[in-house]
Structure formats: structure tokens, C-alpha cells
Image: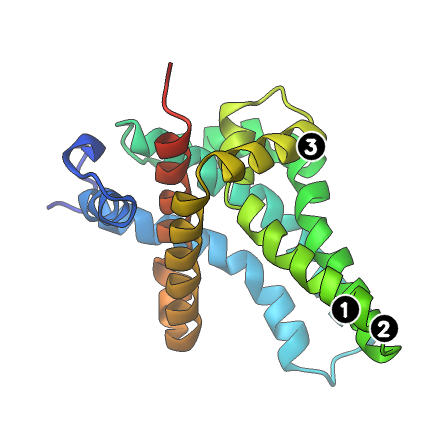
Amino acid sequence: MPFFDDSGPRPEEERGLLWRSIALIGDQLERMILLNVAWAVQLLPALAAWAFPGLPDWLRIGLTTYTAFAFIPASAVLFDSLAQTSQGVPLSPDLVKSSLKAQFKPSLVKLLPLYSLFFWLVMAATLAVQNKLLVLDVLTRASILFLALFSLYWGTLFIYQPHASPVQLFSASVRLVWRQPGKTLLAGFISLLALALGIISIGGLFLIVPVLVVLIQVQLYHAVHPAR
């Protein structure tokens, strides 16, 4: 296949969440890798801040803050581009640029509050451990697990329900988990396994794993929320 083959993906040919996602990647592998690398580059400043504790505090804070804010629009672009690719639109630089232009501000308004919930829960769990508050520790850890399940739908709901508020996106994700807990748990397990393998290999995380995880979530959304 040429590097910029414009043949669109054929998701209808595959049925399983994982295999459909892999098939979509295989259709436009080089472009998928480039998209994944563009997303992963946004993590480098925070990784540098953590890897080099000797850096000035102001620089480490600045690097981490950049990643914290850049991660959200980059993820929105990932979801938007791959949602369109899943529907047969060839992945292209113009598609990615239009996604960035369309989703930059909305993602900060809607997705940032949702994903920041993980930060606050981790802070609460840390506080509970430091003060030996067993009940709070158990509750926060359980909340993080449930939040991880709900978050499997945030990116796709953000794309497919563009007028929904953060509260509405959260409520919709809870309903989808309630509607199909089995499929959600399966998708969550597959995503977690893929991320674990990507982190272990390092290269996988920067080359293709995030794209695979997002595609799995897109397929999951269509599986539990079929078009009427």
C-alpha cells in the first residue's frame, strides 16, 4: 500500500471491537502512526519534568502545565479524526487540521472538567492514605475505578453529542455503562491491556497504542449506541 493511499477504511467488514479497530489501523497504518506520534509528542514536556527533577521548579511546573492542557485538545482531535475514519472518511492532514480547529476550544470547556476528576480523586486518595482515613481511601479508589469505566465514553460522546454540557456528557456515560456493562468492561479490559503493553514497550505508546484505544472506544460507542 502506498504511503498516502486514499482508499477509505472498511469497518463493516469486521465485527469485534478489537478486530475492527485493528482492521481500521491496517487500512491506513502510516497515517495512523503519524497521528499517534503527533498526540504522543504532547506528553514529552511532562515526561521531561518528571525525568529530570533537577530542573528549576518553574520550568517543571511550566512543562507539566503545558502537557495537562495540550493533552485535552490533542485527545479531542484523536477522537474526532478517528470517529470520521471509522465511518469511511480517509485520514488526511486536512482532516486533522479541521478537527483541531473545530475541537480545540470545546474540548477545553467540556473534556477538561471531566478528565480533571481523576486528578481530584487521586488527590483525595493520597490525602486519605496520609491521614489513615480507611473509609475515604476505599471510596476514592472505588470512585476512580467507576470513573475509568465512564471515561470510556467521554471522548465519543463529546464528538457525537457536540451540544451536550460536561454534566450531560457524564450522565450519558453513566447510562451507557448501565445499559451495556459487559461490553464496557470488556472494552475497558482490552484498553487497559493495550496501554500496559504500550507502556512496557514504550515504543508502542508513542507509535500506535493510543490510536488503538481510541478506535476501540469509538467501536464501543457504536455497539452500545447504535444509530436509530
How many angstroms separate mark 1 from mark 2 (CA)? 6 Å
Name the disc covering residue 166, or none: 3
Query: Relative to residue 146, is residue 92 depicted above or below?
Result: above
Point 80% across, 73% down: residue: 134
Residue 207 image-quadrant placement = bottom left
Mark 1: which secondary structure?
A: helix
Which one is earlier in the sequence, the residue at label 3 or at label 2?
2
Q: Residues within 10 Å of mark 1 (few under 14, many from 20)?
A: many
Which one is earlier in the sequence, the residue at label 1 or at label 3?
1
Residue 29 percent coordinates (x, y): 23, 50
Q: Looking at this rendering, what residue extends furthest in the left direction? A: 1
Contact, mark 1 vs mark 2 (Cβ under 8 Å):
yes
Task: Look at the image and tell me whether residue 74 can be seen.
Answer: no
Mark 3: which secondary structure?
A: helix
Query: Relative to residue 224, is residue 66 depicted above or below?
Result: below
Mark 2: which secondary structure?
A: loop
Three-letter code for the amino acid on which mark 3 is drawn: Pro
User: Which residue corresponds to mark 1?
Assistant: 137
User: Which residue corresponds to mark 2?
Assistant: 133
How many angstroms separate mark 3 from mark 2 (CA)? 30 Å
Residue 180 percent coordinates (x, y): 44, 38
Which dot, 3 or 2, sits closer to the camera? 2
Contact, mark 1 vs mark 3 (Cβ under 8 Å):
no
Point 64% across, 39% down: residue: 111
Point 62% across, 73% down: residue: 48
Three-letter code for the amino acid on which mark 1 is drawn: Asp
Residue 210 image-quadrant placement = bottom left
